[in-house]
Amino acid sequence: MSDLEKYISKRKKNDIDFSIGFDEGYAEFKLSEELKQLRHQAGVTQEDLACRLSTKKTAISRMENNSEDMLLSTLFKIAGALGKRVNINFVDA
């Protein structure tokens, strides 16, 4: 385990607000990265996806760079535009 991983683990145990914020931030980052990967795998540009969703390329860029919250309905639209479905799982904290 790296020093950073040790620090994060210790901080999460001692600071509930940090723990919640860290986990939520990581989940949002992971979602943004997955959306970007799905788009790339589909061979679709940000502009192409924006056109399919009747939005602007900048909106797609913001979603992929995790700078805006996404509605569940938006995730369903993106998935449909890329020929995918959304599957949500809840896991123990």
Image (cartoon, rainbow, N blue to C red):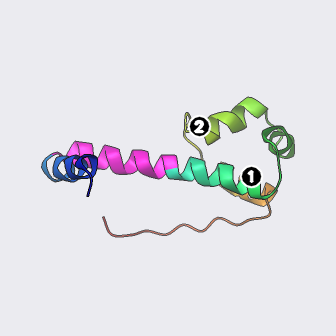
Q: Kindly indicate the quadrant of the structure image that contains residue 91.
A: bottom left
Relative to 47, 29 lies left or right: left
Q: Name the spot of residue 28 as percent of width and height, x first.
A: 49, 47
* Quadrant in which the C terminus is drawn: bottom left
Name the amino acid, label 2: Asn
Disc sitting over residue 23 in the figure: none
- Mark 2 surroundings: few (<14), some (14-19) or many (≥20) residues within 10 A: some
Residue 63: x, y in percent? 63, 40
Please tell me whether residue 19 belongs to the stretch shown in magenta: yes
Can the viewer see residue 64?
Answer: yes
In the picture, measured across the screen, residue 2 lies left or right of residue 36, that is left
- Above or below, 91 against 30 in this view is below
Residue sitting nearer the eye, 93 or 42: 42
Q: Mark 1 points at which residue?
A: 39
Direction from residue 70 to residue 40 in the image, left or right? right
Residue flagged by tag 1: what amino acid is it? Answer: Arg
Marks 1 and 2 sit apart, C-alpha to C-alpha, by 13 Å
Residue at image point 59% right, 49% down: 33
Which residue does the numbered mark 2 point to in the structure image? Answer: 65
How far from the left and from the top, in percent, is residue 4? 27, 46
* Image: magenta residue range: 15-29
